[in-house]
Image: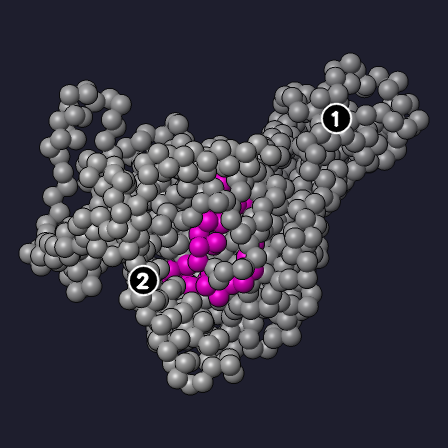
Amino acid sequence: MGKHDKKTGKGRLDKFYKLAKEQGYRARSAFKLIHLNRKYDLLAKSKCTIDLCAAPGGWLQVAEKYMPKGSLIIGVDLHPIRALPHVTTFVSDITTPQCRNLLRSHMHDWKADLVLHDGAPNVGSAWVQDAFTQNELVLQSLKLATEFLVKGGNFVTKVFRSQDYNSLLWVFGQLFDSVEATKPPSSRNVSAEIFVVCQGFIAPKHIDPKFLDPKHVFKDVAALPTSITQSTGEGSTTAASSSKPAVNNQAHANVFMPEKNRRHRDGYAEGDYTLFHKTTVGDFVKGADPVALLGSMNQIEFVTEEEKGWLKSRHTTPDVLANFADLKVLGKGDFKLLMKWRTAIRLQTGLDVKADATKDLTEEVNIQPMDEEEQISAELERLRESKLSQTKREKKRANEKKAKELLKHQLHMTVPTDLDFDDPTLGGEQVFDLGEGEKELSRRGRKSTLGETLKDADGMSSSDSESENEEEDAEVLSSDEERERRTEALEGELDGMYDEYQERMKERDARWKVKQARLRDKNFAAWHGIKEGSDAERGEGDGEESEEGGWDVVTARKEKYDVDSDDSSDEEKMSGIQTHEKKRKAVRFDTGQKTVQKNQGLVTSLREKEEKAQMSRQAQLWFTQSVFKDVGDLAALDGVEEEEEEEDEEMSEELSSAEDEEGSDVEMASVSDEQDGEKQEEEEEDDFEIVPQDKDDGQAWDVDNEDQDEVKQKVIKDKGLLSAEAITLATRLINRQQTLSSLIDDGFNRHSNLNKDSLPTWFLDDEAKHYRPNIPITKEAVSVLRERQRALDARPIKKVAEAKARKKYRAIARLEKAKKKADGVMDTDDLNDNEKAKQVGKLLNRAKGKDKKKEKKIVVAKGSNKGIKGRPKGVKGKYKIVDSRMRKEVRAEKRIKKAGKKRR
Ligand SMILES: C[S@@+](CC[C@H](N)C(=O)[O-])C[C@H]1O[C@@H](n2cnc3c(N)ncnc32)[C@H](O)[C@@H]1O
């Protein structure tokens, strides 16, 4: 937090910070829960709450305050949480089974009504990474929630608005009745955090683990490559195993076709996330995808006897061995060297057969003598063919160049403007059918592509994989010049493969991957997409499966939707929201690409399909949000189903302008915009801020201490409001002349944030003396206080009041005693009624002090009283004459007696 400017953005010590400090909350985030609770009333109805990632305990304080007394509150965090009254806390990592077990032991057989999660891992690193790991943590907390929540229970979690956001919401939607995302006022606008409140846990009997597995839920939902069209439309199994662009397609594969479209690269073990991977040379030589292997491994070793035998091969140079030892640093030359080595070894071991090129070229021909006319026509024919083949070659080379550019574009290595779609060389369908299509297929299948390629390059054999161009290639190879050109082309292809290898290397870098995903995901930024009522869907035909929580079933349904969405059947046209959604998305895509698409044949159709499919999936996630639950047939709102292209265009323009107007969405756009740079990324970190506690702040939340609020309330209850300002403000609140929030706002002014350390003492003294907040007071408030003061003044002094009270107390005690005695008198049989009445009268009189024994007056026999007999002069009533000496002696006697007693 130190790195932030205290005046701006995240570092700003705002009113919630001040309030937290004032009210003794340990973190300003406490107000987030207060605001969420105000909106959803979650705490008052919870008897058991689990707070995952609870340190330093702000949320726990709020939970303790607002939950019913005697509730069970458990908090867990990586860091210890200082003790809080009525709260159980322990230290654990919520991603570990140990945490689960500890929770179990604390919960006994209880189920939680509420699970809270405000976790933020690794706050302060790159935003993209934060968002990614944050959302993984969210999924982990959801996992614990599903285990400990009671049916109908609630789950509150913090989510980062990133590209995984919609995926998360979709998963929440499958497990809860209602899912709402909200940003409480206390959450800073610069923060990308948002809180999702999931209410009404469905508590399925079984939840497919895939719902809670980051590998299945997350990643590039938006970016869908060409393979989608293949795998949804046609032979999906083949597409699944061979789809190259799965690089960009992980999330799609995971979320919508978990089994079908998953890529299984050689060398990647399921669930293996260690950074260092090695494999054997055998895998490299015999495997189908050597490029992928080089891209995914760190080291290749010679292990088996056969492999060690290859060490003796003349092709196994020290360079080759050095390259195998560290694949991460392969340069272009190294890469080519290894691929050539592989080809050589494959030939050596008979895995590839070296075609006899010379045999083809030295085929015996019987030359018949020709006449002149025949010779001319043969010459003409030869020239024509030579011309034709030359044109073909040129065209082919141009096509290859364009195809390579197109591939680069598909891999997002170029900007669309790099492609000249109007180029006539690109117009032919063969670009895809023969050139790029063939290359794409061979790259995916890795069927002897490189081997053959290299054979060609070395002039060792001719390619037998190319069918249509075989004859042409033979021609090409017939001259040295052509062979050279061919070699160049093949070198070019090797270069392409090297690029691909580099792509794979980059892929392994998670950070790069997430950044790349964000780049690709430009569309996501605008939060576009229309809807599909997931809740309704769950409620309808698939009630059973949602009850069971089957990921595959749910995703299969989505997949089905995808397939449907690619065919524009009549049925689909009638399907309301979905159709509408699809159309809008297609329209959106059109805005960007329309001019390009019009004249492009196959290129156009593939791209169009891909984009449509992509949009549909985004829309699916978007519309699973509960806010769309009650929205009916959106298509009906738009009227006619099938619109002309022009109408689509208009609509897309409207859409984009509407999006521009949406404030929050624009904010999202800025979040995902790469150009925003590091500065913004930093700002969009978690909004969490610990409130430093003053020395006495610590005591405020000591176990034995009371809540500050309660103390203040007690004072007000006992003594009332003590100032005219307070009475005035209270009166204004009661009379609704002012709202509570405006009152709080008024409490903050330029003086509340004074940094006293940097100011001179004279100024501070002056301020303390003269600056007083000027809160207006009313006449009534002042007179109320005056009246109270008068009443206080009229009271006797404390000692007198105490003496009076003592006297009164003693009188009451005497009367009680007399009453008891009188009862005893009445019960005796020895006295007649008259005597009894007399006795009782006496007792009561004595109790009232009327019948007090008259004291004897002591008269000292000295002076005029010395030696007198009878009543001394001026003395009334009983008297006793004492000798002064006698008095002294009596007192001394008493003293001695007392002292003797003590000694004993
Ligand atoms: C924003 S703070 C929580 C603040 C808390 N809600 C409050 O009001 O005081 C995020 C917390 O998540 C915790 N955290 C992050 N990853 C965790 C994990 N894997 N297990 C447990 N706690 C984790 C951090 O230690 C940190 O204390």
Where residue 542 sits in the image (x, y, percent)?
61, 74
User: What colour scheme does the image use?
Assistant: one colour
The residue under the point 57% across, 32% down is 903
| Of the pair 576 and 453, the residue shown nearer to us | 576
Q: Amino acid at mark 2?
A: Lys
Query: Which-is-in-front pick, marks 2 and 1?
Result: 2
Instruction: Give the residue furthest to the right.
Output: 305
Where residue 73 sits in the image (x, y, percent)?
55, 54
As helix, strand or loop, the secondary structure at mark 2 comes to loop
Determine which residue is flagged by label 2.
852
Is residue 111 visible in the rendered structure shown here? yes
The label shown at residue 691 is none
| Of the pair 229 and 151, the residue shown nearer to us | 151
Q: Decide which of tag 2 and tag 1 comes sooner along the chain.
A: 1
Q: Is residue 162 left or right of residue 735?
A: right
Where residue 306 sits in the image (x, y, percent)?
91, 28
What quarter of the picture does the C terminus occupy?
top right
The quarter holding residue 820 reads: bottom left
Extent of the magenta region = 37-66
Determine which residue is flagged by label 1.
299
As helix, strand or loop, the secondary structure at mark 1 comes to strand
What quarter of the picture does the N terminus occupy?
top left
**Label 2 to label 1: alpha-carbon separation:** 114 Å
